[in-house]
Image (tube, rainbow, N blue to C red):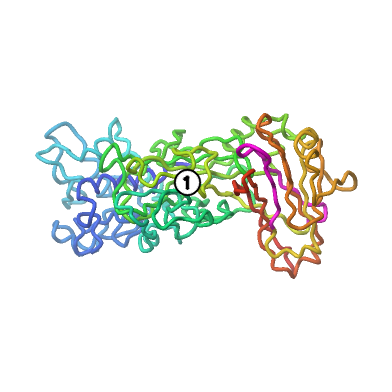
Amino acid sequence: MPGTSFNYAIFKRLQAAFYRDFGLVSGGHMAADPAQLLGGFSLIYPDDPHGLVMGTLSSAASSAGLTPGSSPLAPVGDTTLADSPLYQMFAQSIGADATVPSTVSVAGRNWPVMPPPEGGTQTNPLWLQFNAGNPPPLINAFGQWLMAGRPDDSPKGGISQPTLTANPPPPFPGADTALLFVASFPDDDGRRFGDGEPQGVPLAHVPSDFWATSQIFLCNAGGQVVMPATLPAGEEYAVAAVIGNSGQGFAGSLLNASLAVTVLADAQCFGTFVSPAVSLPSLGNLDPADTNATYEQFVMLPRSWDVAGFRFNVNNVFSELAAVLDPSKLGGLTPAEWLKAGHACVKVRIFGGEQQNFFPPSDPDPPQLTTNPQRNRHIAQHNLAPFDPALMAMKKPFWANFILSQAGQGSNGLSIEPQNWPLDRVRFWFALPSGPYASYVAKAGHRGFELVGEGVPKPFPDCVMLRQTTPGARLVVEDHQREGYFGMALGIEGDPTNLAQARLGDVAATHIAHDGTVIGGFSLRPQLPVRG
């Protein structure tokens, strides 16, 4: 998606502008009933049968003197702006006072200017805001989209707008106003441990492997969810984060500036808790080169889902993360070498839109990158690209680099949790640089792990390797707040011929704070060898 995002930058603004014109219920271009669509044209979602991408006008078009079944856009393949009535309807809507026409003629037929002016003057405040400049930014972006062949990057499948609309989030008990959250699991209702919800919420309401269940996805240029084994250089994806409102109230600046809703996404070095991070540009930016990180959600309807989008350019993220990684903490590897075996994860945070002190989260709010998703509905995190260690390489063993940061005060713990792995046929490892090992691990004795010094390829030059000897053992890491963070690696070793018949699940590394709370982690997903 090298250009301006159609869905997040253009379509979402069109929706917001016409919500403002026609209200927040049904009616106008937002009517659920095609017979009630103003002019027969729908802005409910991009690929509505009467919508922007491929749609034709509904039966309601006749009331505006238009022809049902005709299209407000030129035929596919025709990128001439003069041939698309809708572009001309938009383009004529901005002008000096009392000069905006009520109709525009395209191919000998009159079409109503959108949004309609009053007395020759455009009065829609959001439309004016979105088009303040020369050329008008939103109208210009819409024209560029038409000339590019109308690429549609709106989320598809389970996170498409119609699918989300048909399956609203469960209601939050007692929330008669907006209750906003980033979804940490399917059918999330926004409730979190310690938020004061009358029924009481256990910590386990959000899964302990929340980094694997959160509804944050990578999408390709066509809006399809993808799960690449690696993040290839030169590729660009959308980070699509499902956000929800499980309350009964509205939120968003469309209603009131004090209810503005914004979303941020930060890419981090692959790790268990928090690590050096860089902000991702918002896909809501009309200028695709704009690095503004703030995505604005103009409206959140009661009991609704939506998707916030961010630009994930692999080359940019890689170089920016390499620039913020401290090479002295990586066991002799350069940041670039480290990242090639570590990839990235992402944290998404939502701000604003709620009444103050209304079911306040029990973990710091507004959310920080260190905020726990099990305790705060305003943050979620996800591994963007699950590792796919080919089992043919596991005899070495296979190593995955990650960052370990201190969580809270006191000792932290790391455990390895394999799902359906035959423990008699596989071995697991942790590796870390010698300095942190001597300062923070050796003193605790690493019970359940043994030192291995020879005969095994190291993941990085300055390396102490610990092989797990007791299933379920927890590696204790003493308080290393003064260190901040350091690099580690998780290893998996096994004979692929002995594992080919096993139904292997993920291998999770879980980070436990001193109080026993799961504070984070990551998951590896094995790739079974292909048999001919």
Report the amino acid beneath label 1: Asn
SS category of the residue bearing label 1: loop
Please state which of residues 53 and 215 is positioned toward the viewer in this rendering.
Answer: 215
Q: Residue furthest left?
A: 119
Identify the residue at image location x=22%, y=57%.
Answer: 26
Q: Position of residue 97 (x, y in %)?
A: 14, 32
| Residue 332 visible in the picture | no
Q: Is residue 430 magenta?
A: no
Q: Position of residue 73 (x, y in %)?
A: 29, 53
Identify the residue at image location x=55%, y=40%.
Answer: 267
Identify the residue at image location x=60%, y=48%.
Answer: 517
| Residue 323 visible in the picture | yes
Q: Is residue 444 left or right of residue 2?
A: right
In this rendering, the count of numbered labels is 1
Q: Is residue 399 magenta?
A: yes
Q: Position of residue 159 (x, y in %)?
A: 44, 57
**Quadrant hosting residue 164:** bottom left
Q: Which residues are magenta?
A: 393-417
Q: Position of residue 161 (x, y in %)?
A: 38, 57
Q: Quadrant of the C terminus?
A: bottom right
Identify the residue at image location x=69%, y=42%.
Answer: 340
Q: Is residue 53 left or right of residue 509?
A: left
Can you identify the residue that label 1 sits on? Answer: 376
**Above-or-below relation of 75 to 82:** below
Q: Is residue 498 left or right of residue 273?
A: right
Please state which of residues 518 and 138 is positioned toward the viewer in this rendering.
Answer: 518
**Quadrant hosting residue 316:** top right
Q: Residues within 10 Å of mark 1 (few under 14, many from 20)?
A: many
